Each structure stands twice: as structure tokens, then as C-alpha cells.
Amino acid sequence: MIIIELDIFNNSIPSIEYFIYRNNTSDWKIEPSQMDFIDITYVVGGRANYIINDQEILVKDGDLLCIPKNSFRSAESPSAGLFECFATNFCMYIIMDGKEVNPPLPLISNIGIHYDIIDQYKKLNEDWLRRSPGYIMRMRARFMLILQHFFEMLIYDVDTHRFDSRIKIAIRYMTDRYAEPITLSSVAEVVKLSPVYFGVLFKKETGLVFSDYLTKIRLNQAEYMIKTGKGNVTEVAQKCGFKDVFYFSRLFKKHKGTNPSTMKI
């Protein structure tokens, strides 16, 4: 079910109805109402009491709320302290047919405080308040990056934004030079680590061994090239770093579920 919803999300865009950076006193509240939008709220300070579809939820700093459209919602700050959060009200539409979807995120999660996400939200807030030409497109792009970050943490269970800087450099090197005969040792040299330590660190950060990650990059590029008619199977295999076309075909079928020679353009 999650896989289907993720495929839908990958082909959807958000329409932002309202955005606010809340830095509220103890008398703040949201009156009970039914929402005609999705509400994603990232709490970065203080606490608040929410009631969502009759469920009482105490949110605190580091919590992420994803309240589906048509939910009944109310909220208020407790008597002590401030409540600080970024809240986005939006609808999500499938690009091809315009149908609405809800992101498959949990109602509440604690993701902790991420300053890179807060920085994106602050830029989103600036765009919302300034509303300079093109701000809608800019806000949509920023919000999509924020959503993608949430998906990595809560759905994909990997946070590329927190990768070790040396692993980020290594991945960029691999994506730039996937057609070349690169090896773990050669990439380890680029990031100035011993091959053994680099291999351990790469697996720890990405969840895959170096060779499997490189194969994934190469096969993804090969799939794109075949689908867009960038060459026959032999040519594509060579352009993507595979010297043996038969080995390439076996790998392709194993990971993509079909033979590259029968894939439709």
C-alpha cells in the first residue's frame, strides 16, 4: 500500500493554501472545525494540545503533525510557555488527472530538530510574506524539498541530508563518473580515506555496500537511456560502465524485472 501511495506522490504537486510561522503565547488556540486542506505542522519549540478526530495529542518540539484533509481539528497552548511551529495548509494533486491525495505520513512523529529543515521553512516564510514575482513556484519547490526530507526520514528510513560530507562527495563523484571504471579504492582516495574505513562508512551511511550503490546508479541511468531511445542495449551498457552486455542484461532483469531488450520506449 505504501509503495502505491509513494508512486502517486512522486507524480503529484502541492497547492499551498496558507502558510504561517507561529510563535504563540499561552492564549493561542485553533477553534474546532473541519479542515478542507492537509495540515503539516513542524513543532520547533514549546508544547500544544491538539484534538484531531476526537483524539487528544500533546505535541512538543521536534514533533511533526500530518493531518489529513477533512479531519476535525482544534488546538491550544497549555498555560505555561510559548508554542513555536511552521504550519502549511495545502492540497496535493496527481499531475495526470488532478485527483487529490494525502501524503502517506503518520499523523504524528517525532523527528527531532533539524536546522536545515528550519532554514528551508524560514525561506518559505520569507517567500510567503514578500510575495515577489514567481513566489508561488518558489514556495512549491521549497515545500516539495521539505516533504521529500520528511519522506526520507519517515518512509524511506534514510536521511541523505545527514550523510557524512565525505559520503556526499563520494556519491556526487559516482553520479558524475558512473560510466568510468571507478572502484571503491579510487573513490576512497578522492575523499582521502582508507578503502577499508571508506567501505564501512559508506555502508553505514547509505545502507548499501559501495558496489551495490554504484550498480543502482548505473542501472537507473541505463533504464532512462533505454526508455528514451539513447542507444541499443550494447551501447547503453557500455555508456553506463558495463563492459559485459550479458552481465548487464542479467543485472537489469534482476533489479528492474524485465529484459532491457524488451523494454518499451
Image: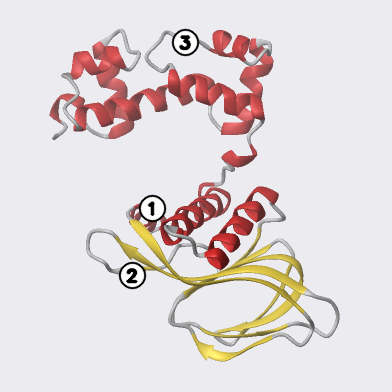
Q: Look at the image and name its color scheme.
A: secondary structure
SS assignment at label 1: helix
Seen in the picture, residue 92 relative to 206 is either above or below; the reply is below
- Give the CA separation, mark 3 to mark 1: 32 Å
Between 3 and 24, the residue placed more toward the observer is: 24
Among the 4 quarters of the image, the one containing residue 44: bottom right
Return the x and y of residue 209 as percentages of the image width and height.
54, 24
Crowding at mark 2 (Cα within 10 Å: few <14, some 14-19, many 20+): some
Q: What residue is shown with label 3?
A: 182
- Give the CA separation, mark 2 to mark 3: 44 Å
Q: Between disc 2 and disc 1, whose residue precedes?
A: 1
Between 146 and 112, the residue placed more toward the observer is: 146
Q: Amino acid at mark 2?
A: Glu
Q: Quadrant of the N terminus?
A: bottom left
At a point 24% along the width and 13% down the height, the residue shown is: 246
Q: Amino acid at mark 3?
A: Ile
SS assignment at label 2: strand
**Does residue 178 appear in this view?**
yes
Label 2 vs label 1, nearer the camera: 2
Crowding at mark 1 (Cα within 10 Å: few <14, some 14-19, many 20+): few
**Does residue 247 appear in this view?**
no
Callout 2–callout 3 Cβ contact below 8 Å: no
In this view, which residue lies farthest toward the front?
A: 133
Q: Is residue 130 left or right of residue 223?
A: right
Q: What residue is shown with label 1?
A: 3
The circle on residue 117 is none
At a point 57% along the width and 42% down the height, the residue shown is: 158
The circle on residue 100 is 2
Q: Between disc 2 and disc 3, whose residue precedes?
A: 2
